[in-house]
Image (spheres, helix red, strand yellow):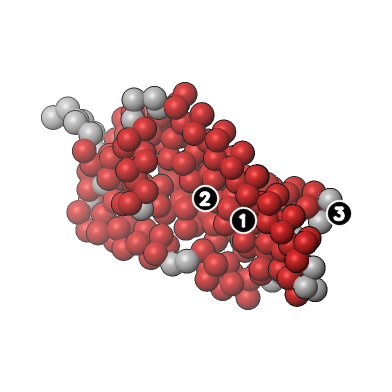
């Protein structure tokens, strides 16, 4: 318990900070790939930027940021937010391109702020909830970089060959992940009950 409790707390704090920041980044970044907002050339550049962040492993991003920012929770938060925010932004941008618009619909930031973002609110919240469990699981593993999450204590007990403690910590990690996944599914059904297939289908496209 002296290792599991602080590990759970740090894992939840890291995961929630990364989730909130990923949501903010996704809301701001998804119009970058919509031609009616960013223009044709701007949309191509936006696609390249999102591909860069969503295809780069978050552990590599965290390691690079760790060298720049020093040892703290901030590099892991930024790495998880950039990676998952890019995935959510990509899926939202794809959905935005398929929305039927009026012939006199505006362009640019007006279209994003007054039509695309309000119409995609349900999908946006559901996608964030979908990535929540994944972010939490990745937050636990970030402990291998020296952060005090569950992964840090699992690695420490493995180095000490205390396999009983390691098994207990792994069980705590699994139970925490299952609890968050169950809560996430319930909230997604409440937020977007008719589009669950679309959100779950984003797993392959992401």
Marked residue nearer the N-terminal end (2 or 1): 2
Answer with left or right where residue 20 lies relative to residue 83. Answer: right
Separation of marks 2 and 1 at Cα, in angstroms: 9 Å
| Residue indicated by mark 2 | 134
In the picture, residue 75 is in which quadrant? bottom right
| Residue 52 falls left or right of residue 144 | left
Q: Label 3 neighbourhood size at 10 Å, few (<14), some (14-19), many (20+)?
A: few
Which residue is tagged 1?
A: 139
Front in this rendered view, residue 178 or 44:
178
Instruction: Please indicate, yes or no, whether residue 132 appears anywhere in the rendered image.
Output: yes
| Residue drawn 37% across the image and 58% down it | 50
Reading the chain from its start, which is encountered first: label 2 or label 3?
3
Give the CA separation, mark 1 to mark 3. Answer: 19 Å
Residue placed under numbered mark 3 in the picture: 2
Which residue is drawn at the image coordinates 61% and 39% (left, top)? 179
Residue 41 image position (x, y, % from top left): 22, 58
Closer mark to the observer between disc 1 and disc 3 = 3
Distance (Cα) linking label 2 and label 3 = 25 Å
């Amino acid at each position: 318990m002296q290792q599991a409790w602080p590990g759970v707390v740090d894992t939840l704090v890291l995961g929630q900070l990364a989730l909130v920041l990923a949501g903010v980044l996704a809301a701001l970044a998804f119009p970058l790939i919509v031609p009616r907002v960013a223009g044709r050339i701007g949309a191509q550049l936006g696609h390249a930027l999102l591909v860069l962040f969503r295809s780069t492993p978050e552990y590599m991003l965290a390691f690079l940021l760790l060298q720049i920012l020093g040892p703290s929770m901030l590099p892991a938060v930024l790495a998880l937010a950039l990676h998952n925010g890019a995935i959510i932004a990509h899926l939202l941008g794809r959905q935005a391109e398929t929305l039927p618009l009026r012939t006199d619909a505006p362009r640019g930031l007006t279209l994003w702020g007054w039509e695309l973002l309000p119409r995609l609110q349900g999908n946006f919240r559901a996608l964030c909830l979908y990535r929540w469990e994944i972010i939490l699981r990745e937050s636990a593993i970030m402990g291998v970089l020296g952060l005090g999450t569950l992964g840090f204590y699992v690695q420490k007990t493995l180095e000490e060959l205390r396999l009983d403690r390691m098994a207990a910590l792994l069980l705590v990690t699994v139970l925490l992940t299952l609890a968050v996944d169950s809560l996430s599914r319930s909230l997604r059904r409440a937020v977007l009950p008719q589009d669950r297939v679309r959100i779950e289908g984003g797993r392959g496209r992401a």
